[in-house]
Image (cartoon, helix red, strand yellow):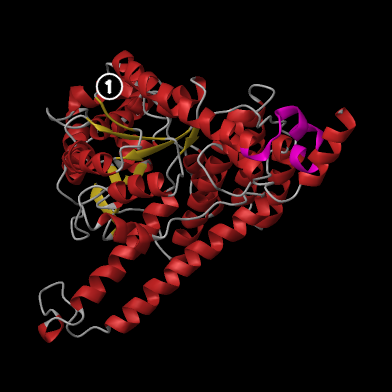
Amino acid sequence: MAHDYLMEGALQGLGYTVKQMDCPDTESLRFGKEFGNRGQCNPTYFTVGNLIKYLTYLRDVEGKSKEEIVSKYLFITSGSCGPCRFGTYVTEYRKALRDAGFDGFRVLLFQQQSGLKQATGEESALKLDSSFFLTFLKAVLIGDILNALGYRIRPYEVEEGSTNAALERCKQHLYKAFCERKQLIPALYRCRKELQMVKVDRTRVKPKVSIIGEFWAMTTEGEGNYQLQKFLESEGAEVEVQSVTAWILFLIWEGQYDTRKRMNLREADSGSKGLKGKNPLKRLLVLGLADRTVRGMFHAYAKAIGLRGYHLPDMDEIAGVANKHYNNHLRGGEGHMEVGKLILNVKKRKVNMTISVKPFGCMPSSGVSDGVQSLITEIHPEAIFLPIETTGDGAINVYSRIQMMLFKAKQAAQKEFDEALTKKGVSIEQLQKNSFCSSHLTEPLKVSKHSVACTSANVVNHFSGIPNKFFIRNKVKEA
């Protein structure tokens, strides 16, 4: 939702009248099932239904005519190709809009492979130039950064709700900067001051849980995935969410990978979408520049706001570890990324537990999480992995399954913390007495060097060679 809010401000700064949609809820699901085809998956029902719900509100509550709505409004969302129902969104929007009485309403889709295309209606009314896409990209990057900070700080806040309050103030600063087309870096520095006011206590041992899976199901923050992120935090976990920036980097990697594979084929792959007559080296150069630009912008904004120690994924590394079990040429859903993420989560001890969430019947993700990942967990029995499916109901069953696996993750996190204390030969009280240690325990933007999954254990391990004299001196005083 942070992305949507910032995009509203960004596009208003370009002169458009924009309103972000509410997060899809169960009422959206009802509208989607009423006007959509049968047998669709959750993302289709929730997103299409959310649009119909809003247009119905404009007509029935605000009293706008169908002609006024069709002429003055349009809807922008994401689309995709691939072997799943996500690729049929165009048809679903067209059918649902017609059956709900809004035939001719304009829907623009950001397609995975082919940019922004219009799915329904006539003229688009959007000027799709470099300024539009660059502004859009900035909103996505900063939305990811705010999310990363929120999920990093919130589990350890001393005063409940202080993180969300600070994030709301941050979003308002950034929204204003986007709307007025001002420099973003000063606004990010103001956001840093807001976040630094949040008090945290990282002596609280919490398991870190990564959410992966089908793109919409793992990124929505509402009832479409049973408010999974909020539920995990309420159960005492620190949540690691996937960034939209990673998806952009994956699309760039796809272009590079395919170009390298095709550029040496006979006659430069002369098919209708081949490389014959094109310059593959120039294409690789442009894609490489795009990758560096996205990463450079992300880290510049992250540094300004105070997001430290955050690493964007190495797409070649993910592809390399996944290719042994899931071919890099398979592109349904997140392709090989879901497999690679789980392997690296375990090998590099990034998290204590990994959840793969996808809609019921999602073909690409189900084939991975219920098929390939079972092999990965056999190879790495230490992995705590849970695949779950969403249907719009049955939240209690999903919650109970998560709680059972989360119990194991909590034990793993506590073990990491206890081992760190034992290795150091110190207690929590001694850590708190050391000002150097205490700053990492209480300052929200401080981050410790990664060695294990649990954040509290990393705080202890981070000081392996620094405070020994301090601890010895305190032990002498105590004696």
* Outermost residue to the front: 479
Can residue 55 be found in the magenta stretch?
no
Horizontal side of 438 relative to 155 (left or right) equals: right
Residue 69 visible, this angle: no
Nearer to the camera, 334 or 89: 334
Q: What secondary structure is the magenta-colored segment mainly?
A: helix
Identify the residue shown where x is 42% and y is 44%: 242
104 lies above or below 418: below
| Location of mark 1 (residue) | 392
* Outermost residue to the right: 477
Disc 1: CA contacts within 10 A as few (<14), some (14-19) or many (>=20): many
Horizontal side of 425 relative to 315 (left or right) equals: right
Residue 388 percent across, percent down from the top left: 28, 28
268 lies above or below 446: below
Identify the residue shown where x is 69% and y is 24%: 158
Nearer to the camera, 64 or 273: 273
Nearer to the camera, 346 or 240: 346
Residue 78 percent across, percent down from the top left: 32, 47
Can residue 436 be found in the magenta stretch?
yes
Dot 1: element: loop
Question: Which residues are drawn in magenta?
Answer: 423-438
Residue type at mark 1?
Gly
Where, quadrant-wise, is the C terminus in this rendering? top right
The quadrant where residue 391 appears: top left
Identify the residue shown where x is 67% and y is 56%: 185
Residue 170 visible, this angle: yes
Residue 392 percent across, percent down from the top left: 27, 21
Residue 188 percent across, percent down from the top left: 67, 50
Identify the residue shown where x is 39% and y is 61%: 128
